[in-house]
Image (cartoon, helix red, strand yellow):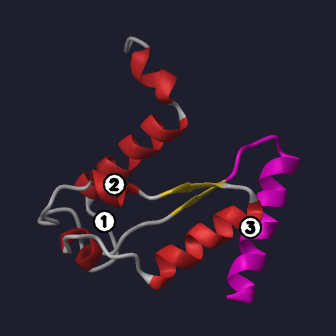
Amino acid sequence: AGEFTDAHVRMRELCLDSGAGFAVLYLPAEHEVAQTPHVTSIIQHLSRGIAGYTGADFLNPITVFPDTSEGLYADPVHFHPAGNRIIARYIMETLFPEARKQPVS
Protein backbone atom coordinates (compact mmCIF):
# COMPACT_ATOMS: atom_id res chain seq x y z
CA ALA A 1 0.00 0.00 0.00
CA GLY A 2 2.99 2.30 0.48
CA GLU A 3 3.78 2.72 -3.21
CA PHE A 4 0.08 3.22 -4.01
CA THR A 5 -0.14 5.95 -1.38
CA ASP A 6 3.13 7.53 -2.52
CA ALA A 7 1.82 7.69 -6.10
CA HIS A 8 -1.31 9.52 -4.91
CA VAL A 9 0.72 11.93 -2.80
CA ARG A 10 2.86 12.76 -5.85
CA MET A 11 -0.22 13.16 -8.08
CA ARG A 12 -1.67 15.57 -5.54
CA GLU A 13 1.57 17.59 -5.52
CA LEU A 14 1.55 17.78 -9.32
CA CYS A 15 -2.08 18.93 -9.31
CA LEU A 16 -1.46 21.60 -6.70
CA ASP A 17 1.66 22.80 -8.55
CA SER A 18 -0.42 23.33 -11.67
CA GLY A 19 -3.37 24.91 -9.85
CA ALA A 20 -5.67 21.91 -10.34
CA GLY A 21 -7.79 20.19 -7.75
CA PHE A 22 -7.18 16.59 -6.74
CA ALA A 23 -9.71 13.86 -6.04
CA VAL A 24 -9.50 10.10 -5.61
CA LEU A 25 -12.06 8.27 -7.75
CA TYR A 26 -13.05 4.73 -6.85
CA LEU A 27 -14.29 2.71 -9.82
CA PRO A 28 -16.37 -0.25 -8.69
CA ALA A 29 -15.92 -3.66 -10.29
CA GLU A 30 -18.91 -5.31 -11.93
CA HIS A 31 -19.55 -7.69 -9.04
CA GLU A 32 -19.66 -4.74 -6.60
CA VAL A 33 -22.33 -2.92 -8.59
CA ALA A 34 -24.46 -6.06 -8.83
CA GLN A 35 -24.10 -6.80 -5.11
CA THR A 36 -26.82 -5.44 -2.83
CA PRO A 37 -26.41 -4.29 -0.25
CA HIS A 38 -23.11 -2.80 -1.37
CA VAL A 39 -20.22 -4.06 0.71
CA THR A 40 -17.07 -1.96 1.12
CA SER A 41 -14.14 -3.71 -0.57
CA ILE A 42 -10.59 -3.48 0.72
CA ILE A 43 -9.61 -1.38 -2.33
CA GLN A 44 -12.52 0.97 -1.70
CA HIS A 45 -11.49 1.28 1.96
CA LEU A 46 -7.85 1.88 0.96
CA SER A 47 -8.86 4.51 -1.62
CA ARG A 48 -10.98 6.36 0.95
CA GLY A 49 -8.05 6.31 3.36
CA ILE A 50 -5.67 7.68 0.74
CA ALA A 51 -8.12 10.46 -0.06
CA GLY A 52 -8.24 11.37 3.61
CA TYR A 53 -4.46 11.17 3.95
CA THR A 54 -3.88 13.46 0.97
CA GLY A 55 -6.74 15.85 1.75
CA ALA A 56 -8.51 14.90 -1.47
CA ASP A 57 -12.19 14.51 -2.18
CA PHE A 58 -13.20 10.85 -2.32
CA LEU A 59 -15.52 10.07 -5.20
CA ASN A 60 -17.41 6.78 -5.17
CA PRO A 61 -20.09 6.44 -7.84
CA ILE A 62 -21.27 2.99 -6.73
CA THR A 63 -24.57 4.32 -5.42
CA VAL A 64 -25.55 5.93 -8.73
CA PHE A 65 -25.33 2.70 -10.73
CA PRO A 66 -28.55 0.83 -11.47
CA ASP A 67 -29.21 -2.43 -9.61
CA THR A 68 -28.06 -4.40 -12.64
CA SER A 69 -24.69 -4.00 -14.32
CA GLU A 70 -25.92 -5.42 -17.64
CA GLY A 71 -24.43 -3.51 -20.57
CA LEU A 72 -22.19 -1.34 -18.37
CA TYR A 73 -19.01 -3.42 -18.35
CA ALA A 74 -16.85 -4.81 -21.15
CA ASP A 75 -15.30 -7.22 -18.63
CA PRO A 76 -15.33 -7.38 -14.81
CA VAL A 77 -13.41 -4.09 -14.39
CA HIS A 78 -13.58 -2.10 -17.66
CA PHE A 79 -16.61 -0.05 -18.62
CA HIS A 80 -18.58 0.15 -21.84
CA PRO A 81 -19.58 3.69 -22.93
CA ALA A 82 -22.82 3.41 -20.93
CA GLY A 83 -20.86 2.81 -17.72
CA ASN A 84 -18.48 5.64 -18.54
CA ARG A 85 -21.45 8.00 -19.00
CA ILE A 86 -22.70 7.14 -15.50
CA ILE A 87 -19.26 7.89 -14.04
CA ALA A 88 -18.83 11.11 -16.04
CA ARG A 89 -22.26 12.38 -14.96
CA TYR A 90 -21.45 11.52 -11.34
CA ILE A 91 -18.13 13.41 -11.50
CA MET A 92 -19.76 16.48 -13.06
CA GLU A 93 -22.63 16.54 -10.57
CA THR A 94 -20.31 15.98 -7.62
CA LEU A 95 -17.44 18.34 -8.47
CA PHE A 96 -19.31 20.91 -10.57
CA PRO A 97 -22.94 21.02 -9.37
CA GLU A 98 -23.37 24.50 -10.83
CA ALA A 99 -22.80 23.07 -14.33
CA ARG A 100 -26.21 21.35 -14.17
CA LYS A 101 -27.91 24.69 -13.75
CA GLN A 102 -26.36 26.26 -16.82
CA PRO A 103 -28.27 26.02 -20.11
CA VAL A 104 -26.65 23.99 -22.86
CA SER A 105 -25.72 26.17 -25.84
Residue for point 74% across, 56% down? 55
Q: Nearer the viewer, mark 3 or mark 2?
A: 3
The C terminus lies in quadrant: top left
Most foreground residue, 46 or 8: 46
Question: Which of the numbered marks, if any, corresponds to residue 79?
Answer: 1
Bounds of the magenta span? 1-22
x, y percentage for residue 94?
A: 48, 40
The residue under label 3 is: 53
Which element carries disc 3, helix, strand or loop? helix
- Residue at horizontal 81 percent and vertical 40 percent from the top: 19
Q: Which mark is residue 100?
A: none
Q: Amino acid at mark 1?
A: Phe
Q: Residues within 10 Å of mark 2 (few under 14, many from 20)?
A: some
Among the two numbered marks 3 and 2 on one chain, the one whose residue lies closer to the N terminus: 3
- Of the numbered discs in the image, which one, if any, rests on residue 84? 2
State the separation of the CA atoms marked 3 and 1: 28 Å
Number of callouts: 3
Where is 70 relative to 86, above or below?
A: below
Task: Locate the N terminus and report the quarter of the image it occupies.
Answer: bottom right
Residue 21: x, y in percent? 71, 45
Does residue 73 appear to the left or right of 54 in the view shown? left
Residues at badges 3 and 1 in contact (C-beta under 8 Å)?
A: no
Q: Which of the 4 quarters of the picture holds residue 51?
A: bottom right
Q: Secondary structure at mark 1?
A: loop
Choose between 34 and 88: the one closer to the eye. 34
Image spot of residue 6 (x, y percent)? 78, 78
- In this image, 93 relative to 21: left or right? left
Q: Are marks 3 and 2 in contact (CB under 8 Å)?
A: no
* Amino acid type of the residue tagged 2 in the rendering: Asn
Q: Can residue 44 be seen by looking at this rendering?
A: yes
Q: Is residue 16 left or right of residue 33?
A: right
